[in-house]
């Protein structure tokens, strides 16, 4: 019970000291979340209230099912963009069908996450390598930032790729609206200045780093409040400024989305990607914050937690949600002690839904757009490209491909390209594992690569070290490597596979070993193994490989050398050491 | 030049002694190939002459571009089945469109193989693990055998899955034709008896094993000849026996298939699978036979060889071809010395196309069906299931899934299921690598798992050994494992990652290590590494990880223990050794 309902663990231990901390954090996060939830709803192409609805029940669900004490769940930028892209392909924005599809996407995503949690399939998220995530998030950030330019310019524009957006913006360039532009760029400048200078200034003024940080992060709220007041005072909407307008007051009605099979078929892949991306983002934040307090989160239970968040988001008229990075950090810094902080935030948003909607009527969309741009620009991390390039060409290739394809062909194609490419590159790397013919370091029991060291070799003996687990991707390489050696070393009588780095041998590799054993036997050569690891040896004992093995299993390579060397061993730099492997 | 045209290597070295060997092998393979090529053309749903055409120019192309001296290229059972399935989905059997689609499939497959060869993408074939290939080939064998029952029964039936075939056969059960059934089951019995008893009998009669083997394999030819003579003598076709009928005499005309973009879109996936399956089958045979003579094949050049075979098959009215198992073994046993044997076989088939067609007019289809059934039953290897199950549950699961899905949902779905499942299972396994908290074996420099051995531990020190390369699939596991240890071992001051089995650290794992380092630093714990391999250390030096690392890199774990142990080390079985890891 306690495993599936973490609330049963933390609630009985709740102390009054926690209450003050959690309440303070909840107030701060609520203030931050109100404009964010409105902005991300617009980003997803939905009415603003959908953002508020997605920030009430999901937070309660996470408090019940989640394992992180500080994760702040709700609408986030990247998932909102993915929602807009997915739903935009099956319905027209503004239609009932669009809203229904978004709600259904949340339900599907929730059910998928829940199923993955119950079936312990969290490892599926591992398909998203770090470079792929980095490339994808950076590209998403750029697309989101550019998509918000339309609000700053006060024009219409649409599209889900860089190219579509730029084309659409260019086509509408005639309609640029002065007041929108002024308010938008003004807010943008204000936010960038706050982000850059407020925190150092507050620190110099003697505030605590935590306080300074929280104030700096309150910038967007301040911008929204000031701009709304200006717009209301000057009645700027009558001069063409686009404002948020009427947001219906009141709590969301609880309903199930109308399910449809064709919609299900069109949305399952985006739902799966949204679930996975959302889970990976959320777990990374939760894990980092938990570790700072020496706490733990349980990734499989997190799947269940996020799954239930999305299901209740769906039934209360919201769209896909997940744990957000910046909001969780604020929650953490504000001192949230338990998941109760999230539940209190939900109460705050519920109150806002009931009473605050008249006050945000005049909120200018250009200012909301500016807050999104500033928020997502921190997601764009182009410096990761040279950094990754220096470390690994393969990983950099995966990053650049994901970034480029996401920008040019959209989020779904981008992320799938990244996943497939990183799998291909991994298989490519492990399909040609590092391996070496080794010889004996004279007068020792050590064996080293004959190409790098002056070592003793024996024309009748070949010791081959493979530095990788043996599995289907490199089974053929192993055969090829051995047959090549067999063809080039004509006096060969004993081949020793040195296995200290072989962590696993799967059925394909076992088959390859059996084929090698048979081929070598036909050619009068014995096959031996040395330094086989315990678990690998256990597995081999479950096959009949050891019954057919022409040679022996040696505990150490030196024992193999001692037993098999003909005594005709050549000293370093002799002819045979040179042609040992061509 | 010589790399891409292996003929430039073997032809100048051709000796007269080779000629007799190659000619003998060519005659034997030609006799075997004539009925096979007709049968596999029918299996692919094509007119019989397409099988002959696919056995002329492709053999010449392989002699020029191939690297195996004994591989016998031509139509094979599994690829013919895959061709029938793919083409059956875009055209009606018997139509011009069907023939054109088959020819186009060969062209696409050829171009893909050629491109994979030039781009050195042969590693893609590694996606097909041995259990997946076994399951797929067995299922294909079963489907082919059942599909040929219609010929034995003299009825019409169609379908690409077990279920469709059985349903179709059942629906037509009323039309079973007595003479077809008698001839078909008679041939089947004859072939099975020959296969079972002829070789031992010939051996006892004093023939050489090689001769006995070749005679036993000539069984199908004998059956075909006898049955054709009977059918012709008794004019059985007038009594309803289906016969091969008129096969146009003469060499194929050289033309390009009419290309069409929609066809290209529908056929690219089947073409890719046919290429890969064909390549894997072919390379396995070629490699096994080459190793028996201590020769080598070059897998990348094999791609180019098979690619050119399929391209010339396409332009000469044939369908997809590859290296066949049984025919290559016969070629090898008959003594083929060089690829010239293949070229001579092509001449043999060309002569047959010119002069033999009148003689095969009366060939009963039921007998051809019987020869296919006997040939493919040797592909069905159900004993591999328990054998693989004993060795590895994961591999057995992949085998069974591929077998079942291929039987029930067809070849394309089957092979894709197998590939995806084996990748998932591999990622699942490596995502939770074997790892252990180790302690010092008292009075030694050895370190062993604290859960299995009586070892010394230190409450301020944790040594974690990971037995797997670190990459995106297990980066998260590593973080989770370390944070769990950090949460459970409250006095921890030093964490040592022991890396003797870490063959690689990719960018995702590096990021995880950086996160771990930062989290541990925040908690006042130092991170150290020990026994880092040379190539891994080289890679780490290309990142800034070592600059941020709070601890040190130790050459041996004992050095780490010596430097970091507080002296408060607990003896075996003390309290702390017990709660060292929960």
Image (cartoon, coloured by chain):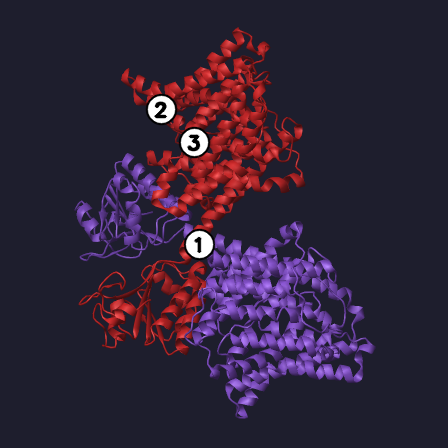
Chain colours: A red, B purple
Chain for mark 3? Answer: A
Question: Which of the labelled discs sits on residue B192, or is there none?
Answer: none
- Looking at the image, residue B517 sits to the left or right of residue B23; the answer is left
Horizontal side, residue A377 vs residue B61: left or right: left
Q: Residues within 10 Å of mark 3 (few under 14, many from 20)?
A: some
Of the residues under marks 1 and 3, which one precedes in the sequence? 3
Q: Secondary structure at mark 2?
A: helix
The quadrant of the picture occupied by the N terminus of chain B is: bottom left
Whole-percent x, y for residue A307 in the image: 52, 37
Mark closer to the chain start, 2 or 1 = 2
What crowding class fits label 2: few (fewer than 14 Cα within 10 Å), some (14-19), or many (20 or more)? few
Point 45% across, 15% down: residue: A186
Q: Chain of mark 2?
A: A
Labels 2 and 3 positioned on one and the same chain: yes
Q: Is residue A123 above or below residue A226?
A: below
The label on residue A17 is 2
From the image, tell me which residue sits under label 1.
A427
Residue that carries the numbered disc 3 in the rendered image: A379
Q: Position of residue A95 (x, y in %)?
A: 66, 27
Pointer 2 with pointer 3, Cβ within 8 A: no
């Amino acid at each position: 019970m306690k495993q599936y309902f973490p609330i049963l663990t933390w609630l009985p231990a709740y102390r009054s000291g926690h209450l003050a901390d959690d309440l303070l954090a909840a107030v701060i996060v609520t203030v931050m979340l109100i404009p964010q939830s409105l902005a991300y709803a617009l980003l997803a192409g939905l009415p603003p209230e959908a953002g508020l609805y997605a920030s009430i029940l999901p937070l309660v669900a996470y408090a019940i099912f989640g394992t992180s004490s500080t994760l702040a769940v709700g609408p986030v930028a990247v998932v909102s963009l993915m929602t807009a892209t997915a739903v935009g392909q099956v319905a027209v924005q503004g239609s009932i069908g669009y809203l229904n599809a978004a709600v259904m996407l949340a339900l599907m995503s929730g059910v998928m996450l829940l199923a993955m949690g119950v079936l312990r399939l969290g490892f599926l998220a591992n398909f998203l390598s770090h470079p792929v995530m980095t490339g994808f998030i950076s590209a998403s950030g750029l697309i989101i930032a550019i998509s918000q330019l339309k609000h700053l310019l006060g024009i219409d524009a649409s599209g889900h790729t860089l190219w579509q957006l730029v084309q659409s913006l260019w086509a509408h360039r005639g309609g640029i609206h002065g007041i929108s532009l002024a308010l938008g760029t003004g807010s943008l400048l204000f936010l960038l200045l706050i982000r850059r200078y407020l925190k150092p200034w507050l620190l110099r003024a003697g505030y605590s780093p935590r306080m300074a940080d929280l104030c700096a992060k309150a910038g967007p709220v301040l911008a929204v409040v000031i701009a709304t007041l200006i717009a209301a005072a000057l009645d700027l909407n009558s001069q063409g400024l686009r404002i948020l307008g009427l947001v219906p007051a009141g709590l969301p009605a609880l309903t199930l989305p109308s399910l449809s099979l064709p919609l299900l078929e069109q949305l399952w892949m985006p739902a799966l990607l949204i679930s996975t991306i959302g889970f990976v983002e959320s777990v990374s934040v939760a894990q980092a914050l938990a570790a700072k307090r020496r706490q733990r989160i349980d990734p499989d239970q997190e799947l269940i937690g996020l799954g239930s968040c999305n299901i209740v988001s769906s039934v209360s008229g919201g769209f896909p949600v997940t744990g957000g990075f910046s909001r969780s950090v604020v929650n953490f810094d504000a001192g949230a002690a338990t998941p109760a902080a999230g539940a209190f935030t939900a109460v705050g948003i519920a109150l806002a839904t009931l009473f605050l909607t008249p006050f945000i009527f005049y909120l200018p969309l250009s200012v909301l757009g500016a807050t999104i741009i500033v928020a997502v620009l921190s997601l764009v991390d182009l410096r990761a490209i040279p950094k990754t390039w220096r470390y690994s060409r393969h990983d950099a290739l995966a990053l650049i491909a994901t970034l480029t394809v996401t920008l040019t062909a959209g989020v779904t194609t981008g992320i799938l390209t990244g996943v497939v490419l990183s799998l291909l590159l991994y298989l490519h790397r492990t399909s040609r594992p590092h391996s070496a013919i080794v010889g004996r370091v004279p007068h020792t029991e050590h064996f080293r690569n004959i190409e790098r060291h002056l070592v003793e070799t024996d024309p009748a003996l070949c010791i081959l070290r493979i530095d990788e687990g043996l599995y289907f991707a490199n089974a053929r390489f192993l055969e090829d490597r051995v047959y090549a050696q067999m063809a080039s070393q004509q006096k060969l009588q004993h081949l020793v596979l040195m296995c200290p780095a072989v962590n696993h041998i799967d059925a394909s590799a076992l088959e390859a070993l059996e084929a090698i054993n048979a081929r070598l036997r036909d050619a009068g050569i014995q096959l031996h193994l040395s330094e086989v690891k315990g678990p690998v040896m256990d597995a081999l004992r479950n096959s009949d490989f050891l019954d057919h093995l022409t040679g022996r299993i040696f505990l150490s390579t030196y024992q193999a050398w001692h037993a098999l060397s003909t005594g005709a061993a050549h000293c370093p730099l002799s002819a045979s050491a040179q042609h040992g492997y061509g």
